[in-house]
Amino acid sequence: MLLKGKTALITGAGRGIGQAIAIAFAEQGCDVAITARTATELQETSSRILAFGRRTVAVPCDLTLPDTVAEMASTAQKALGPIDILVNNAGYACFKPFMELSLEEWQQTLDVNLTGVFLVTRALLPDMIARKSGRIINISSVSGLRPIMNQTVYCASKHGLNGLTTTLAMEVKPYGIRVHAICPGGVITRLSDENMPERDKTDWMLPEDIAHTALYLASMPERSTADIIYIRRFGSVPLGG
Ligand SMILES: NC(=O)c1ccc[n+]([C@@H]2O[C@H](COP(=O)([O-])OP(=O)(O)OC[C@H]3O[C@@H](n4cnc5c(N)ncnc54)[C@H](OP(=O)(O)O)[C@@H]3O)[C@@H](O)[C@H]2O)c1
């Protein structure tokens, strides 16, 4: 059991990559708090966590509403105790040409992918700093590493998230806190189905592949760390290739 005795809070854990991470962590002995907006989807993840005999709490929360985020984090901490691992996974995507983006779409993307991470991280960091221990795993994207046509705001949010990740890693190092980002290429989820319906996804990654990477980071030896991990489908070309 790689995460026996640990606790985690995972955002966007009702489906897709976040749900796969929640299940993988529970399978490895971790108690897992989960959040997203859709309560019915959280229930499904909860029941799968409970099946491994782990504790869980599901706290519905919209990360674009700043006032509710601190309350969500506090509910999770009260239910499970101090949170060892935060996975900032919740994400929103709107792929279209720059001139067709509405201000609302621009704002929603930054609010979920960047400000949401800011809010949840700020809610949990004080306790991690006090305990001089903790790990934060941000689910970024290949869109945080290179330009992709028609993804201006998504690319901006994920480039921003990578910058947040590495800069925060420096800032919280004195407290023994690790901060990582995973940058996946294409994964079969609702987000990619809705935004890239025309793409053939037969060789795309599954959410479990990203959960595997998150588990690797969550269980790394203390003496080593990783900043940004790019994980891509085998059939794609390496970065810069
Ligand atoms: N799929 C890919 O190809 C791919 C590739 C690279 C990176 N990623 C990243 O992976 C992460 C997970 O995405 P996914 O592909 O698994 O998508 P998904 O299946 O659509 O899941 C997204 C999750 O985020 C939650 N969420 C969205 N808006 C929210 C809000 N305002 N407040 C709280 N929760 C919210 C959703 O729950 P509710 O709707 O119920 O709130 C859901 O649980 C995202 O950060 C995404 O950018 C995905």
Image (cartoon, rainbow, N blue to C red):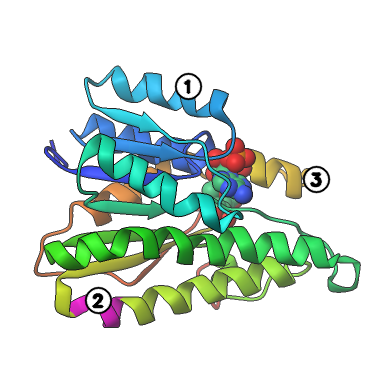
* Label 1: which secondary element: helix
Q: SS of the residue at dot 2?
A: helix
Tag 2 near tag 3, CB within 8 Å: no
Quadrant where the N terminus lies? top left
Residue 160 versus residue 107: which sits nearer the camera? 107
**To which residue does mark 1 refer?**
44
Q: CA distance from mark 3 to mark 1?
A: 29 Å
Q: Residue at x 47, y 67 (%)?
A: 118
User: Which secondary structure is most common in the magenta stretch?
Assistant: helix
Which amino acid does the dot numbered 2 rest on? Val
Q: Which residue is mark 3?
A: 198
Horizontal and vertical percent for residue 56? 31, 29
Q: Which residues are magenta?
A: 169-173
Q: Residue at x 68, y 55 (%)?
A: 93
For label 3, the crowd category at 10 Å Cα-Cα, with few meaning under 14, some 14 to 19 and many 20 or more, is: few
Helix or strand or loop: what does disc 3 sit on?
A: loop
> Is residue 239 visible in this depiction of the protein?
no
| Residue drawn at point x = 22 percent, y = 43 percent | 7
Measure the C-alpha gap from mark 2 to mark 1. 34 Å
